[in-house]
Amino acid sequence: MKVVAYLEDDAEELLGAFNGETKTIYILKGSNWKQTLFHECIHAALYFSGAGEGLSLSKEESIVLALEHGLWPLLFG
């Protein structure tokens, strides 16, 4: 995991990002790092399992958000 001062993709500011090629999670400094890290770990799990293959970015994000919002309260709530 790397903490960065600025993070963007296609001119959109991000709180976090996962790069599958380098197996690196980037977290924006000053963000809610625990929840952002959890979110990016879900992206990583989809990538490593192959379950995210063929999904559009918006569909993957919808799945990640559903899992994040469903699991976070169970695990940390």
Image: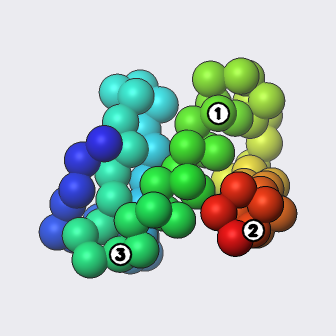
Left or right? Give the position of 71 relative to 28.
right
Quarter placement of the C terminus: bottom right
Q: Nearer the viewer, mark 3 or mark 2?
A: 2
Image disc number at residue 73: 2
Residue 39 pos. (x, y %): 58, 56
Residue 11 pos. (x, y %): 37, 73
Residue for badge 1: 45
Of 22 and 68, nearer the camera is 68
At x 40% / y 28%, what residue is drawn? Answer: 23
Mark 1 closeness class: few <14, some 14–19, many ≥20 residues within 10 Å: few
Of 65 and 10, nearer the camera is 65
Indicate which disc, 3 or 2, sits on the residue closer to the N terminus.
Answer: 3
Q: Is residue 50 above or below residue 14?
A: above
Mark 2 closeness class: few <14, some 14–19, many ≥20 residues within 10 Å: few
Indicate which disc, 3 or 1, sits on the residue closer to the N terminus.
Answer: 3
The three-letter amino acid code for the residue at tag 1 is Ala
Q: Quadrant of residue 73?
A: bottom right
Of 64 and 35, nearer the camera is 35
Spatial CA distance of label 1 from label 2 is 19 Å
Q: Is residue 66 above or below residue 13?
A: above
Residue for badge 3: 31
